[in-house]
Amino acid sequence: MTIGLALLSGCADGNEQVGERPVFVPVDVGDIAADNDERLLLHPKLVNCVADPSSTQSSRLRIVTWNTAAAQRSTLTEIANAMEAVDADILALQEIDVGTTRSAGQNQPAELADALGYDFVFAEALPTEGGAYGLAVLSRLPFSSVRRLRLRPELSSEPRIAIDVSVCSDGAEIRLINTHIDYKSDAASDQLEGLGLVLGVLSGPVFLLGDLNATPDDSGLEALLVETEFVDLLESRDPGSTQGSRRIDYILGSETVDDRVIGAGHIDTAASDHRIVWVDVEGEAG
């Protein structure tokens, strides 16, 4: 699989815009820590989540998180090949570029989604090198809601965000929050505490996943798990390292999710300095 260069930004109305900077479009958001300046790219439009009697959706749902290092340690084609091999239904990606000089102007989430047949949403964490750097979620299931969340900035080395999305799985919504926490320990604890407040008011099947820049014994991560009653879905299944000798990439889930996990693990790849982390969930995880 080979991916070419492009300067296209997918938009919520299904159109595309061309330019040196991505064209960010407003998306309807809720009232929990949502940013008034959404800075989101979304393709295609959001859907209303209703059951489809003709659905042939697989009984297995594979959810993946991966810090791609913005394809700076490989090519976007190698990133796509690794993603294709893992065969995920939903991918939460960190360190993604749109229109930056260092990435030769590529719209990485749009090009990956187009090559592999996914819907996508991208959220800017910060502008850089003529473009944007941030997070993306790619999904075979349609998006029914999307929000960009700003994490607490006071102690952070740079702006940090999360994408809060819901996807529609056979008429039921599954919620996923993809994030990349700051590497400074005090900032990480502060941002994890803030995310815990968001998770504490959510119900139903919910996943928090991403590069949390925290080892399992980190006090901020431990506090989040205790306060939210979320479960580290890899801890009892495959708690190996995810970057070098450290374990800092996670898929956490609400208690109802843990009961439906039928497999989990890590995948080594030379395309990034982070391993791919995955869980398989039975049915629609609800």
Image: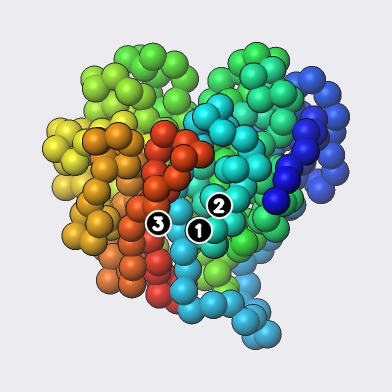
Q: Neighbour class for label 3 at 10 Å: few (<14), some, many (≥20)?
A: many
Instruction: Name the spot of residue 47 as percent of width and height, x first.
Output: 68, 60
Q: Which residue is drawn at 76% across and 29% down?
A: 23
| Secondary structure type for disc 1 | helix
Name the front one of labels 2 and 3: 2
Q: Neighbour class for label 1 at 10 Å: few (<14), some, many (≥20)?
A: some
Q: Residue at x 33, y 62 (%)?
A: 264
Residue 143 visible in image:
yes
Q: Is residue 171 left or right of residue 131?
A: left
Q: In which quarter of the image is residue 152?
A: top left
Toward the viewer: 245 or 114?
A: 245
Q: Which amino acid does label 2 sit on?
A: Met
For label 1, the residue is 86
Q: Are marks 1 and 2 in contact (CB under 8 Å)?
A: yes
Residue 250 circle label: none
Toward the viewer: 77 or 158?
A: 77
Mark 1 and mark 2: span between their CA atoms? 5 Å
Q: What residue type is labelled 3?
A: Trp
Q: Residue at x 40, y 18 (%)?
A: 153
Q: Is residue 33 left or right of residue 218?
A: right
| Secondary structure type for disc 3 | strand
Name the front one of labels 1 and 3: 1
Mark 2 and mark 3: span between their CA atoms? 11 Å
Q: Which residue is drawn at 65% across and 42% down?
A: 77
Q: In the displayed structure, would residue 24 be above or below residue 196?
A: above
For label 3, the residue is 278
For label 2, the residue is 83
Mark 1 and mark 3: span between their CA atoms? 8 Å
Q: Neighbour class for label 2 at 10 Å: few (<14), some, many (≥20)?
A: some
